[in-house]
Structure formats: C-alpha cells, structure tokens
Amino acid sequence: MIRAEKVSFAYDGEPVLASVGLEAHLGKVVGLIGPNGSGKSTFLRILYSALPPREGTVLIDDAGVTSLSSRELPRRIAVVAQEAAPNLPISVAEMVLLGRSPHRSSLQAYTVEDHQIAAGALRRVGMRELADRSFSTLSGGEKQRVLIARALAQRADHLLLDEPCLIVIITI
C-alpha cells in the first residue's frame, strides 16, 4: 500500500500542495486527475522520494519512503515519468533490461532470467519485435511503451505512471 498523509510542498515559497492525502491499496488502481500545473507530478515525485515534502509523510507498505535505501526503493516502486527519456544509444531490449538493475549489484551481469523477464515485458506492451532496434529511433508513443515495459521488468510492487493530465498508481 502507498499512503501519503498531510503532504505539503512549495517551490520557492509558493505553495503547490497543501495537506494532500492518498491511500492506494494492493490490487487497486488510483488515478489523480487535474489540469497542467496543478501539482500532480510534484505529488508523484514526493511519493517516490525524488522530492522531499515540506510537511507530511509518505509510507510504502508501512515503511517511510525516505527510510528505504536506494536499492530497496526501486524494488518497491517503478516509475514511468512524464519527462522524455534520454536518447541513449542502446537497443530497446537494453533499455528494458535497465529495469532489472535494482535486482543486480553494480558489476553483476544480467542473467538468463533477467533477459526472459525483459522479453516478457516487451511482449506485454506489444514491442517484442522491436527489441533489437535503437531506442533513439522510436516514435514518442513507442518510447512510452518501452518505458512501461522497463517498469514492468522491474517487478516492483507499485507502478506510478505520470501522464500530462492523469497520474495512475497501480499497486500489485
């Protein structure tokens, strides 16, 4: 479960969020809808600890999000951010394999199981046939599908999707 309690945030002293709360239970999908600039992405960044709240608490499965290590947090939460992914000179398959990084030590090679998980995630989003193509040559929509596959390959308990007018929180 993801729970946010009384979360507030401000940019340069200008309030963006004031005492916002959320509960997303296992097996449920939660959507946050609002116009551009209403604080949805800011709230999402606070949920996955990219921004610290000015006030309030965020819990992931009853653990404070800020108490989770940099290795543990991506095992619990996978994020597909709204910002464009960098155009790295890597293949689609390699981009999806990056989702397996939280399960490897820094110098450990990807296993056969990692490759199978990545291929399965690409199949789920209908992109398996483009596995050998360069990520940088894809259209915007194709890149988004690959980034969703990367998040699925991560096999986290929670999936956060940031879109321009909607944020979706899926707890698995």
Image: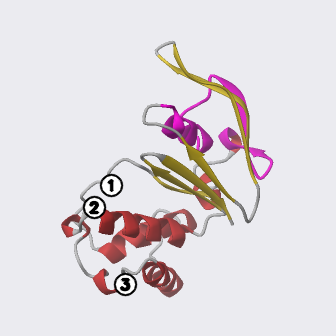
Q: Where does the image place residue 127, in percent across and percent down from the top left?
A: 36, 80
- The residue shown at (35%, 77%) is 93
Disc 2 crowd rating (10 Å Cα; few below 14, some 14-19, many 20+) is few
In the picture, measured across the screen, residue 54 lies left or right of residue 105, that is: right
Q: Pick out the residue farthest to the right.
A: 62
Q: Is residue 49 above or below residue 77?
A: above
Res. 107 visible in picture? no
Q: Earlier in the sequence, mark 2 or mark 3?
A: 3
Q: Which of 70/57 is in front?
A: 57
Residue range of the region highlighted in magenta in the rendering: 38-66
Q: Is residue 107 above or below residue 59?
A: below
Residue assigned mark 2 = 140
Distance from disc 2 to disc 1, alpha carbons, whole Å, reads 10 Å
Q: Which of 142/71 is in front?
A: 142
User: Of the numbered discs in the image, which one, if any, rests on residue 128?
Assistant: 3
Residue assigned mark 1 = 85
Which label lies toward us, 2 or 1? 2
Q: Report which quarter residue 15 is drawn in.
A: top right
Q: Which of 59/67 is in front?
A: 59
Q: Where does the image place residue 123, in percent across and percent down from the top left?
A: 44, 84
In the picture, measured across the screen, residue 148 lies left or right of residue 76, that is: left
The answer to whether the residue labelled 3 contacts the one labelled 1, judged by CB atoms less than 8 Å apart, is no
